[in-house]
């Protein structure tokens, strides 16, 4: 797979302001076109939540943001399969559910009757932990999938 997968047009942005972008060295817009490094982008967001997505970002909101990035870039190609291998189960579940199970240390359940009675409360209480865990899991996946270094 390519090392970088998205292109962002940025003019006049200092490197220190966007360490998640790499300048294109060739082509008609060399120096003006910056290539998005997904791993660096999510690291930047994570380190700057208060000024980017919001310090009170919920897990559900972060999932929507990640889905939006994926819709335009296919960044998550293979993410579901990667999570299933990591957990050893959950093939029929959506990736956000797999991340939830992984964060809470519970084997993926396919039926609500298989979940602990206090499951919904546990998920709600762990919202900020789920946000942190999604950033960690995304970083691990992107490091493998796109072979991206952190800037």
Image: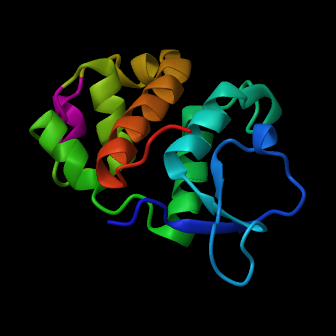
- Report the residue that reaches farthest toward the left: 88
Drawn side of residue 114 relative to residue 73, left or right: left
Q: Is residue 144 visible?
A: yes
74, 112: nearer the viewer: 74
Q: Main secondary structure of the magenta part?
A: loop
Q: Is residue 124 visible?
A: no
- The answer to which quarter of the image holds residue 137 is top left
145, 116: nearer the viewer: 145
Q: Give the vertical position of 31 relative to 110 (above or below).
A: below
62, 1: nearer the viewer: 1
Q: Residue at x 68, y 41 (%)?
A: 19
Coordinates of residue 53 in the picture (x, y in percent): 73, 38
Q: Residue at x 65, y 36 (%)?
A: 44
Q: Which residues are magenta?
A: 107-115
Quarter of the image for the N terminus: give it: bottom left
Q: Give the vertical position of 9 relative to 60 (above or below).
A: below
Coordinates of residue 43 in the picture (x, y in percent): 57, 35
Q: Give the vertical position of 136 relative to 71 (above or below).
A: above
Quarter of the image for the C terminus: give it: top right
Drawn side of residue 85 relative to residue 63, left or right: left
Coordinates of residue 121 in the picture (x, y in percent): 45, 18
């Amino acid at each position: 797979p390519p090392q970088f997968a998205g292109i962002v047009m940025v003019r006049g942005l200092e490197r220190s302001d966007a360490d998640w972008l790499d300048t294109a060295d060739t082509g008609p817009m060399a120096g003006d076109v910056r290539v998005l490094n997904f791993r660096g982008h999510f690291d930047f967001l994570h380190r700057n939540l208060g000024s980017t997505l919001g310090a009170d970002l919920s897990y559900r909101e972060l999932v929507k943001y990640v889905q939006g990035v994926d819709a335009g870039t296919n960044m998550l190609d293979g993410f579901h399969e990667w999570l299933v291998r990591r957990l050893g189960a959950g093939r029929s579940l959506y990736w956000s559910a797999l991340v939830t199970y992984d964060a809470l240390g519970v084997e993926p359940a396919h039926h609500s009757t298989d979940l602990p009675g206090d499951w919904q409360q546990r998920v709600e209480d762990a919202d900020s932990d789920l946000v942190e865990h999604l950033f960690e899991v995304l970083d691990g996946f992107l490091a493998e999938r796109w072979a991206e270094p952190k800037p």
